[in-house]
Image: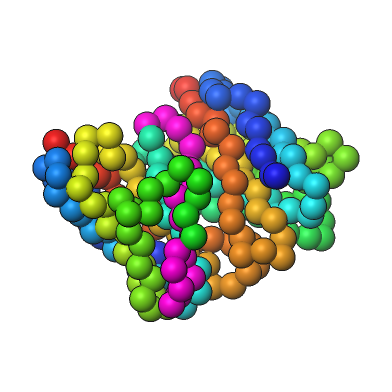
Amino acid sequence: GAVVSQHPSRVICKSGTSVKIECRSLDFQATTMFWYRQFPKQSLMLMATSNEGSKATYEQGVEKDKFLINHASLTLSTLTVTSAHPEDSSFYICSASSSGGGEQYFGPGTRLTVT
Amino acid sequence: AQSVTQLDSQVPVFEEAPVELRCNYSSSVSVYLFWYVQYPNQGLQLLLKYLSGSTLVKGINGFEAEFNKSQTSFHLRKPSVHISDTAEYFCAVSVSGGYNKLIFGAGTRLAVHP
């Protein structure tokens, strides 16, 4: 149980285009979803937290207009990187939680490369 | 504010040797503590967690960790490592009672050599 999927696993896009990453909880309802960014050989940095049906809460320094997060249902959250640039290339990981019990279930990650 | 310090960025060890990966946290309130493992180009897998109760927590793959409140530590141990344990290990903390926002340490690269 508690499986989280991400799609796509890898994406390459041209500079200036937008790309959408999906995060799905497959066997539970995720009231809260989190989006992280991980640079090579570094830790995960929380970008934003989203609760179903509410606007996402972004961490300091994360551009809301560049990283659009939508949590429209209890099983799906999307991250859209708008007008992507090479510096947005990174590994994006989502996680989901069904309650306030302190445990998150992580997706396998999406490798974004902007050329 | 909470923070997590992983004292070793890399830990080389020979196969079948014991290993300890160190983690210290800073928090003024009660916390939940986690260890995650990340294999190359993959997401995170939960090894073990401490929410309450016994301070010695056993996880998957033969790992265990001990919560020490007085030393604000949550070190991860395994008595005998395998080549397959080579990975990045992250210690994380979340504030209990909240919506479980996780703060991660910088990670420790465990390299198991034959």
Question: In the rendered structure, which segment of residues is drawn in magenta?
Answer: A40-56
Q: Is residue A26 left or right of residue B15?
A: left
Give the x, y percent position of residue B29. Answer: 79, 52
Q: Is residue A63 left or right of residue A82?
A: right
Q: What is the quadrant of the N terminus of chain B in the image?
A: top right
Q: Quadrant of residue A70?
A: bottom left
Front residue (pair B64, B91): B91
Q: Quadrant of residue B5?
A: top right
Q: Residue at x 30, y 51 (%)?
A: A66
Front residue (pair B97, B37): B97
Q: Is residue A85 visible?
A: yes
Q: How is the image coloured?
A: rainbow
Q: Residue at x 11, y 42 (%)?
A: A14
Q: Residue at x 36, y 62 (%)?
A: A69
A11 magenta-colored: no
Up-down: is B50 above or below B71? below
Give the x, y percent position of residue B89. Answer: 53, 38
Up-down: is A37 above or below B21? below
Q: Is residue A2 visible?
A: no
Give the x, y percent position of residue A92. Answer: 35, 48
Front residue (pair A52, B19): A52
Q: Is residue A78 left or right of residue B33?
A: left
Q: Residue at x 43, y 77 (%)?
A: A53
Give the x, y percent position of residue A5. Answer: 34, 63
A45 magenta-colored: yes
